[in-house]
Image (spheres, grey):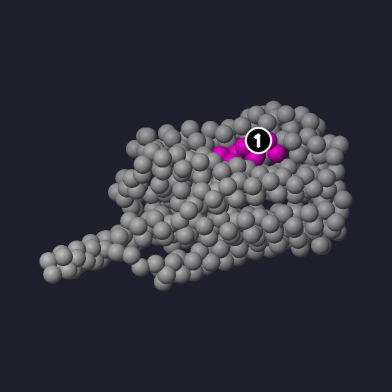
Amino acid sequence: MKNSRFKTELLKESLIESSALKLKKEILLFQPSKKIKLNYIGFFVVYFTLSIINTYLVVYIPVYLLNILNVNRIDLAFIQVFTFSVLLLAPALGFFFDKYNRQRKKILFLSILACILSFICTIFSGVFLYLFGSFLALNLLSSEIIKVCMSRIILESSLNEVIKDRNLTIINISANFGGFISSIIFIILVNDIFNLELWIYFFLFGGIVILPILTALFCFDFKNTPYKHTHTRKTKDNSNKTHYFQILLLTLSYILIWSDRLYQYPLVSWITSKYGQIGLKIFSFSYVFFLLLNTLGWMIGQKISNNSKRNIKKKVINLNPDFNKQLDLDFIANKRIYAIIITNCIYILLTFLMIFSNLIILLFIYSLIWFVAGIMMLNYISLSISISKNMKYQTFSFQIFKLGLAVASVIFIPMGTFLSSFVSTESLILMVGFLSFFSLIPLFYLKHSYK
C-alpha cells in the first residue's frame, strides 16, 4: 500500500515537472517575438546582400574574366588557391566568437564596410589579376566574418527544430532573392556582352545595391540575443567525442557533395562559348527559375521536417523529459540522414545526365538539381546545427562543418579553372558525379552512430 502511494506521488511530481518544463519552453518561445522578427529582417538583409555579391562573383565575373578579358586560366587558378584559402579561417573565427562575443557589433560593422569596399574594388580590378585576387581574398574574409556572426545568432536563437528550420528557410529565401535581383540587373543592362561600357554599368549598379546591408546592424540585439540564456545539454566526455565524430563525418560528406565547384567557373563561360550571347541570356533567365526552385526545395524540406516532428510526438510517451528530448533528437537526426542520402542519390543521377544533354535539356536538369539541392542543404545544415548545439563551443563546432564548403572551394575551384584549359567541361561534370557518389560513404557511418 505504501509502495503504491509512493509511486502515485512520484508520478504526480514527474507530471508536474514535465508540465513546468513545457510551460517554461512556451514562455521562452513567445516572449521575445519582437526580437525574433527583427532577427528575421536582419537575416534577410545580410543574406540578400551576400547573395548579390556571390552571384556576381560566381556567375558573371567568370564570364567577364574568361570570355571578355580572356585572362590566362592557369594564372587565375594559381591566384584562386591563395584567394579561397582565407575561407579556411572559419573555425578559428567561430572559436573567437565563442570566446569573445562582446565586441560583435563593432566587428560586424567593420566587416560590412570591408565587404562593401573590397567587392567594389574586386569587380573593377579584373584586368590586373593579382590585384583582383587580393581584393577578392579580402571580400571573402569579410563575408566569412559576417557569416560567422550570423551563425552565432542562429545557434543562439534556434531553441527548437521549428525555429531553426524557419531561420534557415528565411535565409535561403533572402539569398535566392539576391541572386534573382542580380540576374534581372544583368538581363536589363547587358544586352551586348562584348560591350565593356555595359559591364561597367552592371558593376556600378552592383556596388550600389549592396549598400542596404548597413541597416542590418540595427536589427540584432547583441546584448540580449533571444534565448541567449539557454544552455547546452550537459554531456559526458564519451558523448562529446561522439558528437565530434558525427560532425566530422557530416563535414566529409559535405565536402564531396560540393565537388560541383569543379565546374563552377568554367560552366557559364562554356555555355557562352558554345551557344553565344543567346546561350548566356537563356542561362540568366533560367537562373531566376533555379533560385525559385531551390527556395521551393527548402520549403518542402521544412514541411517534411515538421511532419517528422509531429510523428515522433504521437509515438513517444514517457514521463522523463530528458529521455523524451534525446529520443526526439535522435529520431529527427535519423530522418534527416535518410533525406540527405535519398537527395544525394537523385543529385548524383542528375549530374551524370547533364553530360548527355543539349542546352535546353541541360538547363532543365540543372533546375532539378537546384530543387533537390534545396531539400538536401536544409537537412545538411539543420543536422549540423543540432549536433553543434550539444557541444561546448557551438559556433566553433558549426564552423567545422561549414569548413567543408571552404575546403571544397580551395580544392575544386582552382582545379576546375586549371583543368578547363585542356579538359572539356563535360569531363569535369563526369568527375563531379563520381566524387559526389563518395559523399554517401560517410553518411552511412553517420547513420550507424545513432542508435
Which residue is under mark 1?
410
Q: Work out whether residue 340 can be spotted.
A: yes
Decide whether residue 394 is among the magenta residues. Answer: no
Q: Is residue 44 left or right of residue 234?
A: right
In the rendered view, tell whether residue 21 sits above or below residue 153: below
Percent of width and height locating residue 78: 72, 29
Magenta highlight range: 402-413
Q: Residue at x 64, y 32 (%)?
A: 83
Q: Which amino acid lies under the numbered mark 1 shown in the image of this protein?
A: Val
Decide whether residue 409 is among the magenta residues. Answer: yes
Tell me if mark 1 has few (under 14), some (14-19) or many (20+) residues whose alpha carbon lies within 10 angstroms of its own: many
Quarter occupied by residue 185: bottom right
Q: Residue at x 57, y 34 (%)?
A: 88
In this view, the residue in front, 56 or 391, is: 391
Q: Quadrant of the N terminus?
A: bottom left
Quarter occupied by residue 431: top right
Outermost bottom residue: 314
Quarter occupied by residue 22: bottom left
Outermost left residue: 2
Percent of width and height locating residue 192: 80, 52
Q: Work out whether residue 53 can be spotted.
A: no
Element assignment for label 1: helix
In the rendered view, tell whether residue 196 sits above or below residue 9: above
Prevailing secondary structure class for the magenta stretch in the rendered image: helix
Percent of width and height locating residue 131: 67, 29
In this view, the residue in front, 383 or 409, is: 383
Q: Residue at x 51, y 48 (%)?
A: 449
Q: Is residue 401 left or right of residue 126?
A: left
Q: Is residue 338 left or right of residue 190?
A: left
